[in-house]
Amino acid sequence: MEWEHVKVEGDGPIRHLVLNRPKVHNAVNAQLLRDVISACRAINELPDCRAVIVRGNGPSFSSGADLKDPALLARDPRGIRHRARLGADAVNAISDLNAVTVAAVHGYAIGGGACIAMACDFQIGAASCQVSIREASLGRSLSWNSIPNTVHLVGPKRAKRMIIFGEMFPAGTLLEWGFFDEVVPDEKLLDTALALAERVVRQPPLPVQMTKASINALVKTFNRSVFHLDEVGVTFTTMSQDARVAEETFFSGASPEWRGE
């Protein structure tokens, strides 16, 4: 199968799920999210696939939401909820893959791009990469069911710092925090991700799949019991006056004046 903004490469037990909008640093638009969901379904139909490396084509893993995509700029409640559900479905499609997933992060992983990386089982970072979750700075809450993933990786206090302030964090800091399993020289990123995938493949397949499924079930049972109103929260914040101010000042570079409305 072929997709507009995603590629599935390789054969045998290790495949690559490649975000493929390199000219815009793999900015996430609605079609890319649909392609991720469809590609994950196709990968799950491959009986020999046991590990998937998730990576970005071009200069970055992903620069986050494509703010030029009309589908991601909806202001009506139905459109906002659809966007949030689409993002959550894409993130969940990655985390629910039968195969073990390894995110190979280079360049930037921002917003939705960071959410995609966090959905994987393991995260490997290039030494020069940077990660930022900036939704709150844009006046809206983080959705895509990704607050739990952030907390699971770095803990509650650091998750608050990452999400509330929207800072750009270097790879070394995120290695110390537990976001990354390893940080390696840029030129060794794919080799390191591949070596980890090969380690997975050398393990007996049934206990590996059972372990992943059991841990995910344990974690997601709690996640979904708390974040079933994720779409409502992002709809409320996106429709706020402060979200409009954030968008206007983001593009103009002016200092926002928040009203709490």
Image (cartoon, rainbow, N blue to C red):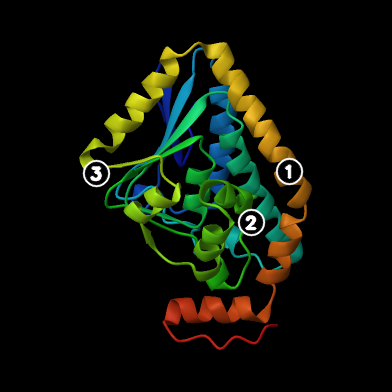
> Could you tell me residue 4's position as x and y percent?
47, 40
Q: Which mark is residue 222?
A: 1
**Res 138 seen here:** yes
Where disc 1 sits, the SS reads helix
Amino acid type of disc 3? Asp
Where disc 3 sits, the SS reads helix
Amino acid type of disc 1? Phe
Amino acid type of disc 2? Ser
Q: Quadrant of the C terminus?
A: bottom right
Tell which of 260 and 39 is nearer to you. Answer: 260
Query: Does the residue at mark 2 contact the one at mark 3 (Cβ under 8 Å)?
Result: no
Where disc 2 sits, the SS reads loop
The quadrant where residue 164 appears: bottom right
Image depth: mark 2 or mark 1 in front: 1
Mark 2–mark 3 distance (CA, rounded to whole Å): 30 Å
**Res 12 seen here:** no
Mark 2–mark 1 distance (CA, rounded to whole Å): 16 Å
Residue sitting at 62 percent across and 19 percent down? 210
Mark 3–mark 1 distance (CA, rounded to whole Å): 36 Å
The residue identified by callout 3 is 186
Residue sitting at 52 percent across and 85 percent down? 256
Tell which of 195 and 90 is nearer to you. Answer: 195
